Amino acid sequence: ESLGPTVTVGEILVEVMASEPGDGFLEPITLVGPYPSGAPAIFIDQVAKAGASAGIVAAVGDDDFGRLNVRRLAADGVDVSAIAVSPDRPTGSAFVRYRPDGGRDFVFNIAHSAAGEIARTAAVDALIARAGHVHVMGSALSMATAWPVLEAALDTVRRRGGTVSFDPNLRKELLRGGEILERFRKVLAVTDLFLPSAEEIFLAAPGAATEADAVAELLGRGIREVVVKHGAAGASRHGADGGVHRQAAFPVVEVDPTGAGDCFAGAYVAALRLGRAPAEALRLAAAAGARNVTRRGPMEGTSTMAELEAFAAASGA
Ligand code: ATP
Ligand code: MG
């Protein structure tokens, strides 16, 4: 952590959700929100709340949806100096409704919102110049404006002796070739810590037959640590030294699964950067994921380090 803050780049959004499950938005329904959201924003909020230094490069509109997000991030300790305010585009938004089968319907306003107005300003370069760790959110790889900033951040931070983590968090349809796949490979080639979900690991190791094969292949390519997330079935951490740690999920009642992976990664990166051992970081990360799913709203369940420790201790795992 002494090298400088953990920095991420990507979308800030508000989320508005249907109160009741059902199909889509084709009739008036009761909605609740706006909630602060965006995978990179949830991640960085959790890093800061856990007590590690953190900053985000992003853009919002000059509207209450933007102010809601910036205020929340700042209140939780995130450096918001590199969040640009677009003069003419609204803050990005996502309307979501859960279907009875657990699937989700969305209406997005992201591509043509302020979220895509990321640029290399003096404030962005200043944050990158101080950074000690870059976390790449796969969702940002599909943003044309985020990529040059990410490339600069990866380059600068690695030159300074800093480290890189990568949560692929990307729909596989986006990786069928072209420049997003190229960006994905470039990030993977400089990743120290890879945090895929069970399905996503095969995006990085498409030839592998099993998860164990995929992990071995990625460690063989020089990634130092692979942490695989399995939702309510827990997570496992594999080190380049051959060490394996498994962590069961803490039993909770799931209210809203959105954001669990982002909180998990945020707590894991924060704990490692604060000097915790990998097994301890994994336990705190599982606590962060579990706590987040108990709250409605993707960023409402981020936790302080004290909350994570108390939760893990009380759950006895
Ligand atoms: P996201 O939908 O946010 O992208 P993800 O697929 O990246 O999620 P998950 O595996 O869903 O990540 O969740 C990350 C971690 O959070 C899990 O490994 C687990 O420790 C914890 N977690 C997630 N869901 C639950 C749950 N229902 N109960 C307890 N813990 C959970
Ligand atoms: Mg994820």
Image (cartoon, rainbow, N blue to C red):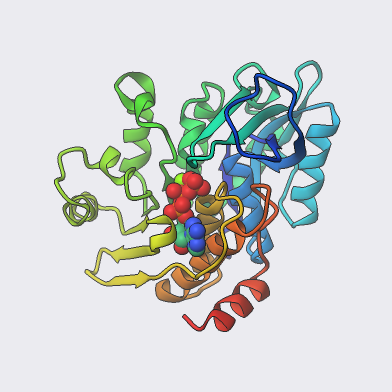
Q: Residue 242 placed where, x, y %?
A: 22, 69
User: Where on the picture, by quarter, is residue 22?
Assistant: top right
Q: Quadrant of residue 178?
A: top left
- Report the side of 77 relative to 115 (left or right): right
Q: Is residue 82 above or below residue 228?
A: above
Q: Nearer the viewer, residue 289 or 188?
A: 289
Give the residue displayed 62% in from the left and 60% down from the top: 294
Q: Residue at x 68, y 67 (%)?
A: 304
In depth, the one of 264 and 71 nearer the eye is 264
Q: Position of residue 307 (x, y in %)?
A: 66, 73
Query: Does 5 sit above or below residue 124?
Result: below
Please say whether residue 267 is visible from this viewpoint: yes
Left or right: residue 82 compared with residue 107: right
Disc tally is 0
Height in image: 217 above or below 253?
A: above
Please name the residue shown 61% across and 39% down the image. Answer: 21
Q: Is residue 158 visible?
A: no
Task: Residue 265 in the image: state x and y as whole percent.
Answer: 50, 56
> Which residue sits at x=56%, y=55%?
263
Give the quarter of the figure containing the N terminus. bottom right
Q: Is residue 95 left or right of residue 149?
A: right
Q: Position of residue 119 (x, y in %)?
A: 63, 25
